[in-house]
Image: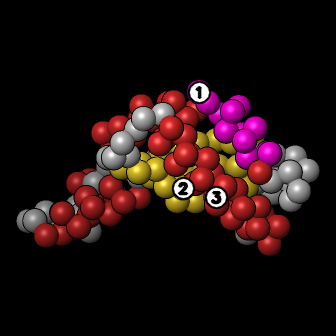
Amino acid sequence: MESNRQKKIAGLLQEDLVDVLQRAASEGGLKGVIISVTKVNVTADLSIAKVYLSIFPNKEAEALLKGIKSNKPLIRHELAQRTRHQLRRMPNLEFFIDDSLDYIDKIERSLKGGDNPIEDPNLLGKRKKS
C-alpha cells in the first residue's frame, strides 16, 4: 500500500519526467515518436522510483529505452533541478517498458479470432513482472 507521500512524489516525478523526455526527444531530432510516462512507483524509503514508459511506435521502444537508461544521470539531474523545492533527495530512477497495451491488444485479437485465451491461457505469453 502506497502512502500519500509516495503518491505525491510519484505524481510530481511523472509530470516532470513527461516534460523532460518529450523535450529531449524533440531536441534530439526524433520526429513522430511519442513517449508517455504511464506510471511511477516510489519505494517506501523514497530511494528508488520505477518509471514505466509507453513508447509509440513500438519498434523503436527498445532502442529508445536503451538511450534513456544511458542518459539516466542527466535525466535525474534535470529532475532534481525542477523539484529542488519539493524534494530533499532525488530517488534513483529505473526505467521499464509498459507493455500492458500490447497485452490487451493480444487478448482482444484472440477473442475476435477463433482462439480463446480464457480457455487456453498458453495462447498469450507470460507477462514479465517488473
Residue 107 to residue 128: above or below: below
The residue that mark 1 highlights is 70
Give the mark nearest the N terminus, 3 or 1. 3
Q: Which residue lies furthest to the left in this view?
A: 114
**Magenta-span inclusion, residue 75:** yes
Q: Residue furthest bottom?
A: 4
Q: Where is residue 96 in the image (x, y as percent from the top left)?
A: 53, 44
Is any part of residue 17 visible from this angle? yes
* Magenta stretch in the rendered image: 70-81
Classify residue 121 as left or right of residue 41: left
Q: Where's the N terminus, which quadrant?
A: bottom right
The residue that mark 2 highlights is 37
Distance of label 2 from label 3 (alpha carbons): 6 Å
Q: Are marks 2 and 3 in contact (CB under 8 Å)?
A: yes
Residue drawn at the location 64% of the way across and 60% of the way down = 15
Callout 2: helix, strand or loop? Answer: strand
Q: Residue furthest top?
A: 70
Residue drawn at the location 23% of the way across and 54% of the way down = 123
Classify residue 123 as left or right of residue 15: left
Q: Which amino acid does label 3 sit on?
A: Gln
Distance of label 2 from label 1 (alpha carbons): 17 Å
**Magenta-span inclusion, residue 13:** no
* The one of 1 and 91 positioned closer to us in this rendering: 91
Q: Are marks 3 and 1 in contact (CB under 8 Å)?
A: no
Residue 14's label in the rendered image is 3
Quarter of the figure with residue 21: top right
